[in-house]
Image: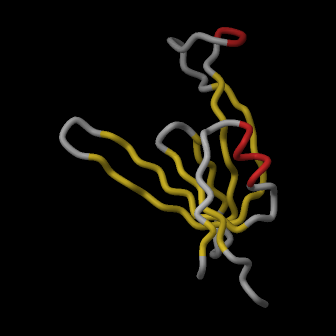
């Protein structure tokens, strides 16, 4: 599996670079007090969505904090939704040959 290491700032630039149907590897880094944890998910982009957090203490548009979310279909058929933030990087993968 080859990659095109396209990494950009979060937000709408990701939507243009990785439209639905694009195979991607999403890496998310969570920074903890004493270490950081990185997780990776590989799948095909299904959709980009702006959704509120639902948090009672978050403030923003309509009293909600809106987050960019990415819906992926993994190889086993599972659908997963990821929040795209400053700790996220996305790389395009080569399409699998059928």
Residue plotted at (58% across, 63% down)? 5
The C terminus sits in image quarter: bottom right
**Closest to the observer, 86 or 44:** 86
Q: In which quarter of the image is residue 18?
A: bottom right
Residue 6 in picture, x, y percent from top left: 62, 58
Q: Quadrant of residue 26?
A: bottom right
Count of number-bearing discs: 0
**Closest to the observer, 77 or 87:** 87
Residue 43 in picture, x, y percent from top left: 65, 66
Q: In which quarter of the image is residue 51?
A: top right
Tell whether 8 sits left or right of 37. Answer: right
Display coloring: secondary structure
| 40 is higher (above) or lower (below) than 53 | below
Tell whether 72 sits left or right of 89. Answer: right
**Closest to the observer, 23 or 55:** 23
Residue furthest bottom as drawn:
98
| 90 is higher (above) or lower (below) than 49 | below
**Closest to the observer, 25 or 64:** 25
The N terminus sits in image quarter: bottom right
Tell whether 40 sits left or right of 3. Answer: left
| 90 is higher (above) or lower (below) than 82 | below
Residue plotted at (58% across, 10% down)? 59
Residue 40 in picture, x, y percent from top left: 48, 61
Residue 56 in picture, x, y percent from top left: 54, 13
Residue plotted at (74% across, 38% down)? 12
């Amino acid at each position: 599996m080859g990659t095109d290491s396209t990494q950009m700032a979060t937000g709408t630039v990701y939507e243009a670079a990785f439209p639905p149907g694009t195979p991607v590897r999403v890496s998310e880094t969570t920074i903890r007090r004493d270490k950081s944890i990185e997780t990776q998910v590989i799948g095909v982009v299904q959709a980009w969505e702006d959704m509120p957090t639902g948090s009672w203490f978050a403030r923003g548009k309509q009293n909600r904090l809106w987050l960019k979310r990415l819906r992926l279909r993994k190889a086993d058929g599972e659908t997963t939704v990821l929040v795209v933030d400053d700790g996220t990087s996305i790389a395009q993968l080569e399409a699998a040959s059928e």
